[in-house]
Image (spheres, rainbow, N blue to C red):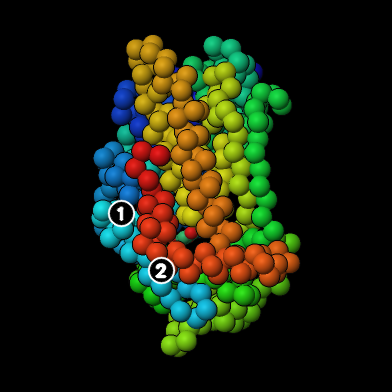
């Protein structure tokens, strides 16, 4: 026997997409339940991306989620492209009429959203297992799951699949009902979090013949660093000393750049792929965030795309559930996909320009260098990078 209850929107996944959707819906009087497979400490501690576009920051602030973000977020008005041992600053704000990005760890966004939801008495269940979706092509879909040792059935008007790339939502759609576009890249990123003061105030995207490297940060005491590595590498071939040596080599400049080092407190290898599921809807199931699309991290876009989906979905669902207006939900997928594909292109472009090509193809290497020189010398080309990086308004 299952315990049965009802809600308007059943949200699968308590990451940034699911939690923000629940938050935006609650502000419009729509009831939802958020189901998360992991524990609360796990979700709030796992180190993820950290770059918020201007539009993402504006949306969080406009919805009462900006208090800690305002205090701890680090506003960046430029970034550095480094190649041939020389750094070139791209003045993001100057090129985009004052727009900037904010460095603020994704797990902080998740913690802020969790606090807001629990403070408002919203339903959020952690450590939910055996999740399955039912009757998603009818007007009475439901979610079955286990929680606290019991079986549950959640009857919904709509289900939002916000459970990421490995979640169950996308697989609930019958094969053939959606088209899945995939591009696998022949490299991965090894990311570390180190207890070392950042070696530069701004992010450094570094192209080097040994492979790409990225310098980022989380606070005045914490550096976040990435290295291009082989997708088949296991963490045990990357002891800390090898990581630092490789980072020193790739970031070295002609004028003696020094990389600050310190204890490594987190280490992870992430594969790189681009995926888009089209359409992002099937019956009463709406996909949002990584459940619908993933981008390689080079453009720093994953979280921002998820926020854009959820912004559109929350508005469309509120219109429909409150007043029966269905134009918004009918256009949900089409509206999201426009930005999804723009961002796919930008992320693919940044990735292709900066990484060591497979097989070290010399022709491709020459093209990359030509492109890097162009982007750092031409104001038009630099503006293309800048406006995509801070987030194009309206696309
Ligand atoms: C990060 O700080 O984790 C980060 C920054 C920029 C990227 C990807 C990740 O492109």
* Relative image position of residue 356 (x, y in whole percent): 63, 67
The quadrant of the image that shows the C terminus is top left
* Relative image position of residue 260 (x, y in whole percent): 45, 81
For residue 88, the mark is none
Q: Quadrant of residue 114?
A: top left
* Relative image position of residue 191 (x, y in whole percent): 56, 65
Residue name at image x 55 percent, y 29 percent: 280
Q: Quadrant of residue 129?
A: top right
Q: In the visual, does 209 lie left or right of 17?
A: right
**Mark 2 lies on residue:** 377
Front residue of this view, candidates 318 and 44: 318
* Local crowd size for mark 2, using a 10 Å CA cut-off: few (<14), some (14–19), many (≥20): few
Front residue of this view, candidates 369 and 24: 369
Residue 149 appearing in the image: no
Q: Check whether the beta carbons of the residues at disc 2 and disc 1 lie within 8 A of each other.
A: no
* Relative image position of residue 253 (x, y in whole percent): 48, 83
**Mark 1 lies on residue:** 96
Residue name at image x 61 percent, y 47 percent: 274
Residue 83 appearing in the image: yes
In front: mark 2 or mark 1?
2
| First of labels 2, 1 by sequence position | 1
């Amino acid at each position: 026997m299952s315990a049965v209850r009802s809600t308007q929107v059943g949200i699968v996944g308590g990451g940034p997409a699911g939690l923000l959707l629940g938050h935006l819906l609650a502000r419009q009087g729509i009831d939802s339940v958020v189901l998360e497979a992991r524990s609360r400490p796990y979700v709030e501690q796992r180190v993820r991306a950290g770059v918020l576009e201007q539009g993402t920051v504006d949306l969080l602030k406009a919805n009462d989620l900006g208090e800690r973000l305002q205090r701890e977020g680090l506003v960046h008005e430029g970034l550095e492209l480094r190649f041939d041992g020389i750094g070139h600053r791209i003045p993001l704000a100057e090129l985009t009429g004052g727009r900037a990005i904010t460095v603020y760890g994704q797990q902080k966004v998740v913690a802020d959203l969790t606090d807001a939801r629990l403070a408002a008495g919203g339903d959020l269940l952690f450590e939910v297992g055996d999740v399955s979706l039912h009757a998603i092509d009818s007007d009475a879909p439901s979610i079955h799951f286990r929680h606290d040792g019991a079986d549950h059935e959640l009857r919904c008007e709509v289900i939002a699949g916000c459970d990421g790339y490995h979640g169950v939502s996308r697989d609930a759609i019958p094969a053939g009902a959606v088209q899945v576009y995939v591009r696998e890249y022949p490299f991965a990123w090894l990311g570390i979090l180190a207890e070392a003061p950042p070696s530069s105030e701004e992010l450094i995207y570094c192209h080097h013949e040994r492979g790409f490297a990225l310098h980022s940060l989380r606070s005045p005491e914490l550096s976040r660093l990435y290295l291009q590595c082989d997708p088949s590498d296991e963490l045990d071939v990357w002891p800390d000393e090898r990581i630092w040596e490789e980072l020193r080599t790739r970031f070295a400049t002609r004028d003696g750049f020094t990389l600050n080092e310190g204890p490594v407190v987190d280490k992870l290898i992430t594969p790189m792929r681009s995926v888009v599921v089209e359409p992002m809807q099937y019956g009463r199931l709406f996909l949002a965030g990584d459940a619908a699309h993933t981008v390689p991290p080079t453009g720093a876009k994953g979280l921002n795309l998820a926020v854009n989906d959820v912004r559109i979905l929350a508005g469309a669902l509120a219109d429909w559930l409150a007043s029966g207006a269905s134009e918004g939900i009918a256009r949900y997928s089409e509206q999201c996909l426009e930005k999804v594909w723009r961002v796919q292109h930008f992320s693919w472009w940044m990735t292709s320009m900066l990484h060591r090509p497979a097989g070290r193809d010399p022709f491709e290497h020459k093209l990359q260098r030509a492109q890097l020189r162009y982007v750092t010398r031409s104001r038009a080309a630099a503006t293309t990078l800048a406006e995509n990086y801070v987030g194009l308004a309206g696309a």
